[in-house]
């Protein structure tokens, strides 16, 4: 009888549990990943690159990690009906032919057909001529940093050119990977801390003191200008800044910069990008947000793809920064107490076969 009562009690408890719980239907609708575009074309014949990716959308102002957009069909079209079909080289990276170049006065747009058939097209961009740059100059600059005891030191680069008086001009200066001399101190080399007999003991090396490497200048900055305040006037305008990390300007530094003309809309987009890149985390910074570009989803007008495709007239600029010509450099300079060939290049930068040999176009005396 006691066992029967226990059995009835268990059944009654189960009945109460199931009677009090209603199944709630829940469907986790994952938002469609957002398409992101990186790339532009210029008037210099070369391989131009367009990078496509997708990011998970978690909120209107926050996206997840980018994933490459593969197997897409990417086309560049001009106003005369010419079409350039790009080839996917690596996942999400699409390349033009080697001799492809935009032309001043022509209008271009980008068309993307994803592997699932969805189509995107950019608003048209017309190539305006960029004025010639007469020369570049540079000076050392010192600015306050977060560390109140140590100022930031760097080099600011200026372009000297005549702004055309008969048109509205918008400029973008893009810093490219640049070459530099790495000056090392192999005579200060020490043994490894795991040396079996004399860890960290002095072990001077005879080679090598000077090597040549490339790097992406730091900090990343987006330099733009428009001539509403100086239309038709001769300009001496800052176009780039490179922070001195104590190692960068121990030797000669070769800066490479693209001098680009852009449209008014491209200028606005790039300027907003520059503002977000320059955020410091202070309470006075504007809140970060997605910046809408000029790409349109033809299948869903409410979609907001990221990125801006533009076409520019390009003039290649370069100058050599000689440390002895700088009024000051960062102190103390950073020691590299071993063979300079041991330097580790940054991600995405090709390591030279022989770092002791200067690049083929290295000519600091001109």
Image: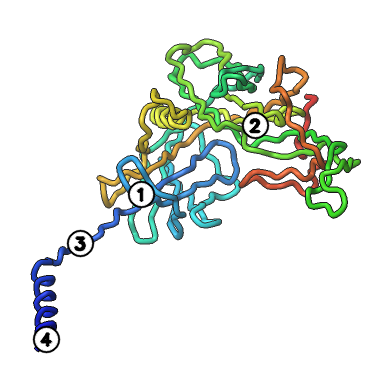
Task: Residue 311: tell me if it is visible.
Answer: yes
- The residue drawn where x is 43% and y is 40% is 309
Query: Which quarter of the figure is the N terminus placed in?
Result: bottom left
Left or right, residue 359 beside residue 13:
right
Q: CA distance from mark 3 to mark 2?
A: 55 Å
Left or right, residue 330 beside residue 169:
right
Find residue 337 and report its image quarter. top right
Task: Residue 207: tell me if it is visible.
Answer: no
Task: Pick whichever, 74 or 256, lies toward us.
Answer: 256
Q: Which residue is mark 1?
A: 34
- The residue drawn where x is 41% and y is 46% is 36
Q: Which mark is residue 26?
A: 3
* Whole-percent x, y for residue 323 in the image: 75, 22
Q: Secondary structure at mark 2?
A: strand
Q: Which residue is mark 2?
A: 256
Q: CA distance from mark 1 to mark 2?
A: 33 Å
Mark 3 or mark 4, which is nearer the start of the sequence?
4
Q: Secondary structure at mark 1?
A: strand
């Amino acid at each position: 009888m006691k066992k029967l009562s226990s059995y009835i009690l268990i059944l009654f408890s189960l009945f109460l549990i199931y009677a009090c719980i209603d199944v709630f239907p829940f469907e986790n609708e994952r938002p469609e990943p957002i398409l992101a575009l990186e790339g532009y074309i210029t008037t210099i014949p070369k391989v131009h690159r367009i990078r496509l990716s997708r990011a998970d959308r978690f909120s209107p102002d926050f996206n997840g990690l980018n994933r490459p957009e593969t197997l897409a069909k990417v086309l560049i079209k001009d106003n005369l009906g010419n079409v350039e079909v790009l080839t996917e080289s690596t996942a999400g990276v699409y390349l033009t032919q080697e001799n492809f170049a935009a032309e001043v006065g022509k209008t271009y747009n980008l068309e993307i057909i994803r592997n699932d058939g969805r189509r995107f097209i950019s608003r048209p961009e017309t190539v305006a001529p960029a004025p010639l740059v007469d020369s570049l100059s540079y000076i050392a600059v010192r600015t306050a940093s977060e560390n109140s005891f140590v100022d930031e030191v760097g080099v600011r680069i200026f372009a000297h050119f005549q702004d055309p008086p008969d048109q509205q001009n918008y400029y973008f200066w893009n810093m490219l990977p640049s070459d530099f001399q790495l000056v090392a101190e192999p005579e200060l080399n020490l043994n490894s801390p795991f040396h079996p007999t004399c860890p960290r003991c002095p072990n001077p090396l005879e080679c090598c003191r000077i090597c040549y490497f490339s790097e992406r200048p730091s900090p990343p900055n987006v330099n733009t200008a428009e001539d509403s305040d100086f239309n038709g006037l001769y300009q001496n305008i800052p176009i780039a800044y490179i922070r001195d990390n104590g190692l960068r300007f121990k030797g000669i530094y070769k800066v490479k910069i693209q001098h680009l003309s852009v449209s008014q809309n491209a200028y606005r987009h790039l300027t907003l990008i520059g503002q977000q890149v320059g955020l410091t985390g202070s309470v006075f910074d504007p809140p970060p947000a997605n910046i809408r570009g000029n790409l349109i989803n033809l299948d869903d007008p409410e979609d907001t793809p990221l990125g801006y495709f533009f076409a520019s007239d390009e003039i290649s600029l370069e100058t050599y920064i000689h440390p002895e010509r700088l009024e000051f450099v960062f102190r103390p300079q950073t020691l590299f107490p071993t063979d300079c060939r041991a330097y580790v290049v940054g991600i995405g930068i090709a390591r030279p076969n022989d770092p002791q040999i200067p690049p083929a176009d290295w000519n600091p005396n001109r």
